[in-house]
Structure formats: structure tokens, C-alpha cells
Amino acid sequence: QRIFDPGKITIANRYFPQDQGKAKDFICWDPEGHGYVDFIHGIAYSCNVFFYKIGGGYPGEIDEGLGIEGVNVYAPSLGYGAPLGIDLPGEEDGLIPNPYWKRITLGENWSTGDTYNSVTGQGFVLATPLQVMTSIATLANGGKVMWPHLVQEVLDGEGNVVQQFEPCVLWDIADGVRTPLESIGSDCPTLPEEIREDIQISRQAIGSPDVNVEPWVIEQAQQGMRLVTTEGTAEGYANLETISSAGKTGTGEFCDEVAREKGLCKPGEWPT
């Protein structure tokens, strides 16, 4: 489906729909808009309005969209919202917000604007760099969420291998089977049991992160991310002659003076 991006969209206040002063504008990073774009080019050009509309819906064009409920299903499946069990101390949960969280935390109702912000990874969303890298690696791996770890092997004083850590899959969103929470990481023989239990405990509130995603959906995302480097927002930065590259540009929502002086406040300055 092709979605029209005029550069910005306006959402009326539900209680004062005729009052333009209370309406809220949601803009694309390109004020001229991208015109009609499909999913692949929405990724390639990092089109905010495309994802606003398919994520939160838009009157007269998309009735509902994915919705924040859908975000809370698919974001955890890519590694967001809970620790991933890396062998380092201090790993944070991150946050994928929902209406209940906002009501309990802020005493406010959820709005369409909150959904728009969430589907673009902004607003109340919090993510660690590890979660961002894991989500991108999952798409590159065809749907396999790998256990992130730093140590490949442990040696004794004479250089002999005492313990070997092999790559292992925590869950696979494209294998057609939904792994129950208690089985997450069960096929990883080198995953320490205490880490596996921590991963399961940290995700009890959201249930099993595994979902069923058709492989063609992941392939479409891969195509879009490939176009990012060949003709999209990272063109000329990562399009290497001898290596096929793909990625996604990102923009920080808030920026202080230090980052601004370093040029880190421009759209797309936080790529993966």
C-alpha cells in the first residue's frame, strides 16, 4: 500500500475538533514531504508520516493502523522492553509504553499522538543501544534473535580452552512456531542457566516475546534497509563498493548544546 506524505499531518483535538488552535501537527523530517511511498521506500527515506499513518491510523485514509497494542506485541519480539542477558552488569530494561503505563505513571489518557511518537521510537519509548543493535541484527538474521555476549571462550593459564561459547538463538520470529516463555533460550547449551532465568523473569510481565512473522515481511524490511544506503537517507555514507550494506538512520528526539555543536542534532545522525 502506498501512503501519501505531504510533509505534515494534523490531528484534531477529540474534545474540540473545530478548534484549530488545539490541533496537533506531526511533521516529517523533510518539510516538503515524500509524496506517495510504499513500505520499502518508507524505510529507505525514513518517512515519518508513512509510519505515523500505518502505526496510528489517519482519518479518511487508514482506519486504525497497527496501534499501540500491536507495537507492544512486535517491539518485544525484536528485543525491546526487557534485558537480553548480555554478560555485562547493569543492563537496563528500556520501555515500550502502553495506555496502562501512561495512566499509572502520569495520570493521563493515551492519545493518537502518543502512538505516532511510539511507532517512530520517540515519545515515551526508551531503548538501550544493545536493544537497537539486536533488533537490526534480527532482521539481518532473517528473524533469529541471538543471545548477545562478549566472551567467545575462556582459557586456563596454559592457553587451553576451558569453556567455549557458541552463537545461540533465543527465539526465532520467522520459524512459524511461537516459543513459550519458559522455553526461551532452551536450545542454547552454552547459555548460563542463571542468565536464561533472568531473561525469562524480566519478560514475565509481557509474556513470550516470540511472534509469528512471515518471512516475506522480513525480506521487505531488508530491501528497504538496503535502499537506505544505496538511494535513501544514508546514500553515500555506507554504500561500499565491495560489501553489500544495509541500515537505518535515526534521529535523536532531544538535543543539548554539546551535541548540537558536534552536528549530532541533524536528522539521521544516529544510524544502525
Image (cartoon, rainbow, N blue to C red):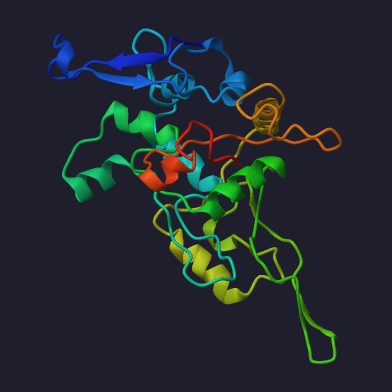
For the image shown, how many numbered marks are present on the structure?
A: 0
Of 9 and 178, the residue lying toward us: 9
| The quadrant where residue 118 appears | top left
Q: Along the horizontal axis of the image, is 230 left or right of 130?
A: right
Look at the image and tell me in which quarter the C terminus lies. top right
Left or right: 241 in relation to 211: right
Q: Residue furthest front?
A: 261
Residue plotted at (52% across, 12% down) = 34
Q: Position of residue 170 (x, y in %)?
A: 63, 57
| Percent of width and height locating residue 127 | 46, 50
Residue at x-position 21% and y-position 17%: 23
Q: Would residue 140 appear left or right of 55 to someone viewing this image?
A: right
Q: Can see residue 142?
A: no
Name the quarter where the N terminus is drawn.
top right
Give the vertical position of 16 relative to 239 (above or below).
above
- Left or right of residue 59, residue 144 in this image: right
Question: Is residue 24 at all visible to an observer of this figure?
Answer: yes
The spot of residue 223 in percent (x, y) is 70, 27
Residue 70 location, quadrant: top left
Residue drawn at 30 percent across, 15 percent down: 10
> Which one is in front, 265 or 46?
265
- Image quadrant of residue 99? top left
Image location of residue 66, percent across then percent down: 44, 28
Q: Is residue 77 above or below residue 227?
A: below
Q: What residue lies at 53% left-to-right and 52% top-to-bottom?
A: 129
